[in-house]
Image: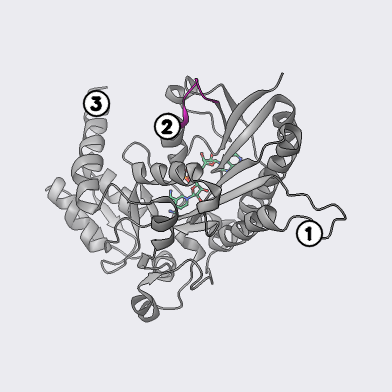
Amino acid sequence: MRKPVILITGANGEIGHGLIEHLHNPDEHSVVALDLKPIDERLQAMCQACIGGDILDDFLMGRLVSEYEIHAIYHLAALLSTRAEYTPETAHSVNVEGTLKLIKLAVEQARWHGHRVKFLFPSSIAAYGLPDVETKARAGRVKETDWNFPQTMYGCNKLYCEHLGRYYTYHYRQLAAEQTRSGVDFRAIRFPGLISAVTMPSGGTSDYAPEMIHAAAKGLPYACFVGPEARIPFMAMPDGIKALLALAAAPEEKLSQRVYNVGAFSPTAAEIRSLVCEAFPKADITFNPDRARARIIDSWPADVNDDPARRDWGWQPDYDAGRAFREYLVPTISRYYREAARG
Ligand code: NAD
Ligand code: SER
């Protein structure tokens, strides 16, 4: 007998850490965690199985089909925006071909067990591309359908995978003699930069915000790689997890689209620095912009219009910038480094 499970790819990453804790509910379903890296020991106890492997490995995909009855997939595995620029073709393989393999897995699973498979996909504000800062200032809160001209490989990958998801949900094999649906129920969120208090980011371009906070908490100096005026939307990780779970739980008939913006707060890098210095008065944060990375940030919107998410599935963030710092980031990060120092 195959066991009904939720599959999380990229499970050992920043979102995976929070998601496993929330999806861990043995009475209702089990979690199978997959990542290139070993899953943190603390999280292993919350998973039915932890699999070390590559989403590009067809043998592994076949094994998943034969061993588990997968009812939902949270496909988090990806190479993030900065890392992807160093190896664009590898990023394309992982981010696009990897996603296609997971969607194909969902199609096969739906055929086997006869239920639709929910496919949750964390897209990104990197799917947008604004040509210059003047246009960015004028654009204001961008809608999902605006400015879809990404300037990074990662952004191109995310935008294309959104289209793949829409295709598999509505138009799969549309010329086949017998019209059948793919069985995939694809839902995506275009996340802002996420800031977690319990994990450190790596390979992203929005990393300057969490890096600033973690450096200050450790008493280390930090030179920010974008200028003080750089502005993109950010979100505290608990709100990111809340958004994914809320979209997953939303009745399908309420969804007027398959890809949703979600917003929370949109500070400049200087405003983030002020909040960090308020919490850690000895923080030593300077600005030393890296022109290429700063240009990527300038191509992302200053803010997003998340009216459809609010209307269709009741999206509302719990944390604005002040609350995120006061009640989540500063206490959790401070406690973490205090305990680490004690050993
Ligand atoms: P992360 O880098 O912390 O985690 C990604 C995980 O994927 C890593 O643990 C990595 O080992 C794993 N992975 C990479 N390639 C793999 C492969 N070939 N096979 C198996 N596992 C592989 O990233 P995150 O912040 O947790 O992001 C998760 C998802 O959310 C990604 O798709 C990312 O694009 C998206 N997202 C993140 C943010 C953010 O600010 N963190 C914002 C928007 C979207
Ligand atoms: N935070 C991510 C990155 O910077 C955006 O998806 O790559």
Q: Is residue 330 above or below residue 322?
A: above
Quadrant into which the N terminus falls: top right
Label 1 to label 2: alpha-carbon separation: 37 Å
216 part of magenta stretch:
no
Q: Tag 1, which secondary structure?
A: loop
Residue at figure coordinates x 54%, y 59% from the top left: 257
Q: Is residue 167 above or below residue 48?
A: below
- Look at label 2 and name its amino acid: His
The image shows residue 23 at horizontal and vertical percentages of 47, 31
- Look at label 3 and name its amino acid: Glu
Q: Nearer the viewer, mark 1 or mark 2?
A: 1
Which of the labelled discs sits on residue 174, or is there none? 1
Q: Bounds of the magenta span?
A: 21-29
Q: Residues within 10 Å of mark 1 (few under 14, many from 20)?
A: few
Q: Tag 2, which secondary structure?
A: helix
27 part of magenta stretch:
yes
Which of the labelled discs sits on residue 22, or is there none? 2
Task: Tell whether 225 sits left or right of 9.
Answer: left
Q: Is residue 6 visible?
A: yes
The image shows residue 243 at horizontal and vertical percentages of 41, 47
Q: Which residue is mark 3?
A: 339
Q: Is residue 188 visible?
A: no
Residue at figure coordinates x 51%, y 46% from the top left: 251
Label 3 to label 1: alpha-carbon separation: 57 Å
